[in-house]
């Protein structure tokens, strides 16, 4: 029997100054600044970070039950395309560069990585699954 749930998530984005914005989680109050300019991630880079971060968390939570990593880096790359003036991303790829200690626990953690990456992609990572499956996006204007 499958279980379906629907859990609303919300962020607010406010303009800090020209081309600089702050996204704030309504639930936790955590925030980050982004935009265009030095020291700021662009929205496209945030999308890549969200995809990589989602799977990184899945892998981290599972593997660190066995061993702390010596190295844990995940890179996300993709091509920004412009088709008839409309932009989108394609061929997004994640590369996991993980090293664990040469101990029994470290080898067990390393042995889990491939399976957890696949599970994250196929089931657990809401971000990459949403990108791949698509989601309806609507807008409304007030004020």
Image: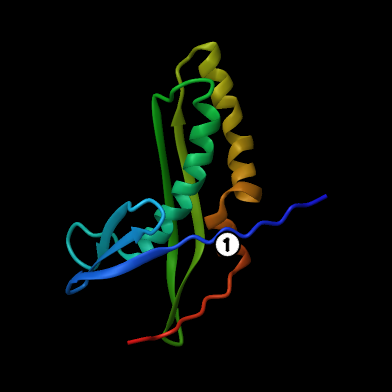
Crowding near the residue tagged with mark 1, few <14, some 14–19, many ≥20 C-alpha atoms within 10 Å: few
Helix, strand or loop at label 1? It is helix
- Residue 14 horizontal side relative to residue 96, left or right: left
Residue drawn where x is 46% and y is 22% of the image: 100
Residue 33 falls left or right of residue 109? left
Q: Is residue 86 left or right of residue 114?
A: left
Q: What residue sits 50% from the left and 12% below the top?
A: 103
Colour scheme of the rendered structure: rainbow
Q: Residue at x 51, y 79 (%)?
A: 138
For disc 1, the marked residue is 130
Q: What residue occupies the far top of the structure in this picture? A: 103
Say above or below: 68 vs 127. Answer: above
Observer-nearest of 72 and 124: 124
Above or below, 73 against 124 in this view is above
Out of 31 and 118, give the one closest to the viewer. 31
Residue 95: x and y, percent?
Answer: 47, 45
Front residue (pair 14, 67) = 14
Quadrant including the C terminus: bottom left
User: Can you give x and y, in whole percent of width and height, for residue 91 in the image?
Assistant: 52, 62
In this view of the protein, which residue sits in the foreground, 51 or 138?
138
What is the x, y in percent for residue 8? 53, 61
Counting labels gives 1
Give the x, y percent position of residue 86.
44, 83
The residue at the point 19 percent across, 57 percent down is 39
- Quarter of the figure with residue 105: top right
The residue most toward the right is 1
């Amino acid at each position: 029997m499958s279980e379906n749930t629907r859990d609303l998530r919300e962020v607010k984005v406010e303009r800090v100054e020209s081309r600089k914005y702050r996204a704030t989680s309504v639930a936790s109050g955590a925030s980050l600044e982004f935009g265009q300019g030095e020291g700021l991630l662009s929205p496209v880079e945030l999308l890549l970070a969200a995809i990589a971060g989602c799977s990184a968390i899945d892998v981290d939570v599972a593997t660190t039950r066995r061993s702390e990593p010596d190295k844990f880096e995940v890179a996300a790359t993709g091509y920004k395309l412009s088709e008839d003036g409309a932009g989108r991303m394609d061929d997004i790829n994640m590369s996991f560069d993980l090293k664990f200690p040469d101990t029994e626990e470290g080898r067990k953690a390393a042995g889990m990585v491939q399976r957890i990456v696949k599970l994250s992609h196929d089931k657990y990572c809401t971000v990459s699954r949403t990108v791949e499956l698509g989601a309806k996006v609507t807008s409304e204007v007030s004020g």
